[in-house]
Image (tube, grey):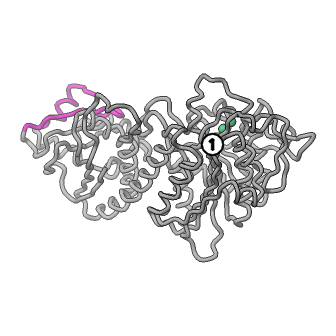
Amino acid sequence: MRISVHQGTIEQERAELVVVNLFQGVTLPGGATGALDGAMGGAIRERLQAGDPLGEFGQMTVFYPRGAVPAERVLVAGLGVAELFSLDRARQLAALVARHVRSLGVSRYTSTVHGAGIGGRDTQEAAQAAAEGTILGAYRFAGYGKPAEDQRPQLEEITFVTNDPAALPKIQSGVQVGQAIADAVCFTRDLVNEPANRMTPTNLAQAAVDMAAGSGLICRVLGPQEMRELGMGALLGVAQGSREEPRFVVLEHEGGRPGDRPCVIVGKGITFDSGGISIKPSAGMERMKDDMAGAAATMGAMRAIAEIALPVHVIGLVAATENLPSGTAIKPGDVLHTLSGLSVEIISTDAEGRLVLADALGYAERLGPAAVVDLATLTGGCVVALGDVAAGLMGNDQPLVDALRLAGDETGELVWQLPLFEPYAEQIKSDVADLKNSGGRGASAITAAKFLERFAQGSRWAHLDIAGMAYAEETKHYVPKGATGFGVRLLVSWLRSRVE
Ligand code: MN
Ligand code: ZN
């Protein structure tokens, strides 16, 4: 999808369709909407006076101007109540518009930037939100079926128009950033939506290599031999049940000043989680291809920051393996030795995410990081606690936790802090090793984080449990059903905040 920006007046645009907006309760439209209404002889006003709810949030009303303006169709998008308007609503509305336009069989349209004028939002941020919402809302995973019955064309070109020359450069730069970020989210969604027989650890690492080559990132991939030399006994332990080899990916963006300590992002990359010997129930197990969503978000965030040339030194780490049961798989009661030197007793082989993260966090410590943030579809307990509305957030450094919380508020990728009180560590004490990998049912999202905390002790560290956020069961505004790409926008927003 191409997105361009130009200066002009919406009522003079020659387009298949032009988009304007309207707040709820407005009876006399102003701005671009008012100008169009005037050119169409009051067609919009007439509907408003008849009581039609044109301004209700998400309401899409199409007008056919029949030559009154050069555009073939005019779409009025409802902004909802003015007091509830936010950047996230602008993003949501852009997505609803994109899908509605496509449902009309139209593949290119011209739009005002929702929220940039009468919405009173910062123009650049509004333009970023508009580009993000449009691309994210129009996303579809190609899949492997026969061509769908729905033969309507994909959206090809969106033009944002403003009549204010001072706003033009702000809209241009906002759109550029929004497009880079949204494209990276779509890249992440594709990785997660791919079936596990295609998105193996080897192929996930190859996707990182290819992406890095296109983005100017440095990329290194470690195989089992290098992992053995490093002492990554936990990652290798999880991998030993599968015939697919594990991969450990290191992506580096050298954006800071020379000698800047890196921010390190760590992603859980279980390309399929059967639970291993502690096998999961079969109902819904197909979803377990999404257990690499943390890794995919890490890769997407790295791609986005390279694309926008963020002046921060960032390293992304991906620990990728399958978790399968077999004659060579780890068993409950086994003890594994991690890169950090701590030993772990296996209670449940289904608590494998924290094992691969333990070695990845150990690797991160050696990089002398300024901060470490890990993302993982880690626990069902987090889904019980926070559902699919917010990710769990835990960490050993409150300013880092607060910064991530703020990034969540700004991007609409909500996160909520859970405590790491010391008594929770009791649940993961082992009789035969330094730690055990399962603390039982109670507070399982927290005891998983208490486990990770032991491997991140030397760093400012935060953990995002995205188990409830990685996959959407139904389409909701800019998040179509399937992989969400959750975390990419949050991470980029957090890293951008470190520049300012
Ligand atoms: Mn598991
Ligand atoms: Zn898992």
Taking the spot 67% from the left edge, 40% from the top edge, the residue there is: 242
Residues 243 and 85: in front is: 243
* Element marked by disc 1: strand
The answer to whether the residue bearing label 1 lies less than 8 angstroms from the nearest atom of ligand 2 is: yes
On the image, the x and y values in percent for residue 447 come to: 77, 39
Type of amino acid under label 1: Ile
On the image, the x and y values in percent for residue 365 come to: 73, 61
Residues 423 and 308: in front is: 308
Taking the spot 34% from the left edge, 31% from the top edge, the residue there is: 146
Furthest-left residue in this view: 67
Q: Is residue 284 visible?
A: yes
Q: Quadrant of residue 75?
A: top left
Q: Quadrant of residue 163?
A: bottom left
In the image, residue 256 sits, relative to residue 118, either above or below, namely: below
Residue 188 included in the magenta stretch of the image: no
Q: Is residue 268 visible?
A: no
Which residues lie in the magenta part?
42-66
Residues 49 and 217: in front is: 217
Furthest-bottom residue in this view: 258
Please name the residue that numbered disc 1 is placed on.
270
Packing grade of label 1 (10 A; few <14, some 14-19, many >=20) is: many
On the image, the x and y values in percent for residue 396 come to: 74, 53
Taking the spot 41% from the left edge, 36% from the top edge, the residue there is: 143
- Regarding ligand 2, which quadrant of the image does it lie in? top right
Residues 199 and 85: in front is: 199
Q: Quadrant of residue 101?
A: top left
On the image, the x and y values in percent for residue 137 come to: 38, 41
